[in-house]
């Protein structure tokens, strides 16, 4: 993965590679977005999200893109080579838009930047996991062409739904 390939500018929005110094801001945006699909607040699962985002930014086999408007990070996408999957498969590990930016095109622009990079990297398929109760995100993904993974249907009690995307088909 060439980490500096994507640098898209649309009006006041720039989509670019996240910098290590931005991990704190990215973690805060992640917390705000994640809190929206947990009615009782996001559970504390013991994850050190700051350390997790720092690792994601520094991974040699991954990439974190951020959408920036007026100097503020308003969207983030983290993807990497999928563990145990074919080389032409990428895993979208995190995708979040700041709730105050919903319905402004940030998510679509960020997704388009991801797809552009996946194509340049020769990826044919992408996968992601979305929280079962996150109807807004599920509808957003469906509108972009993501479909439930027929090879990995959810089991009773699962909290996440696996989705797949044909990179070459968009």
Image (cartoon, rainbow, N blue to C red):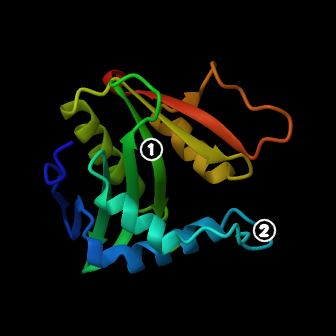
Element at badge 2? Answer: loop
Query: Across the whole image, how many numbered discs are drawn on residues?
Result: 2
Return the disc, 2 or 1, that comes first in the chain's sequence.
Answer: 2
Q: Nearer the viewer, residue 121 or 6?
A: 121
Q: Is mark 1 on a helix, strand or loop?
A: strand
Q: Where is residue 77 in the image (x, y as percent from the top left)?
A: 39, 55
- Asked if residue 98 lies left or right of residue 15, the reply is right
Q: Residue at x 51, y 29 (%)?
A: 164
Q: Distance between the residues labelled 2 and 1?
A: 24 Å
Q: Badge 1 local density, few (<14 within 10 Å), some, or many (20+)? A: many
Pick whichever, 27 or 143, lies toward us.
Answer: 27
Who is closer to the viewer here, 14 or 38? 38
Instruction: Give the residue number, with chain letter if any, for mark 1.
Output: 92
- Identify the disc placed on residue 108: none
Residue 119: which quarter of the image?
Answer: top left
- Neighbours of disc 2 within 10 Å: few (<14), some (14-19), many (20+): few
Please provide percent x and percent y for residue 7. 15, 56
Q: Does 98 sit above or below residue 128?
A: below
The image's mark for residue 39 is 2
Point 35% across, 21% down: residue: 169
């Amino acid at each position: 993965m060439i980490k500096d390939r994507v640098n898209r500018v649309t009006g006041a929005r720039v989509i670019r590679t996240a910098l290590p110094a931005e991990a704190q801001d990215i973690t805060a945006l992640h917390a705000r977005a994640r809190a929206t699909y947990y009615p009782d607040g996001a559970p504390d699962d013991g994850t050190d999200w700051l350390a997790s985002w720092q690792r994601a930014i520094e991974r040699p086999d991954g990439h974190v893109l951020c959408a920036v408007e007026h100097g503020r990070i308003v969207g983030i996408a983290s993807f990497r080579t999928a563990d145990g999957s074919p080389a032409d498969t990428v895993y979208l590990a995190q995708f979040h838009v700041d709730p105050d930016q919903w319905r402004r095109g940030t998510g679509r622009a960020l997704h388009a930047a991801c797809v552009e990079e996946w194509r340049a990297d020769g990826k044919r398929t992408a996968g992601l996991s979305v929280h079962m109760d996150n109807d807004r995100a599920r509808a957003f993904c469906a509108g972009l062409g993501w479909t439930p993974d027929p090879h990995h249907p959810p089991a009773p009690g699962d909290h996440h739904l696996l989705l797949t995307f044909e990179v070459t088909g968009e």
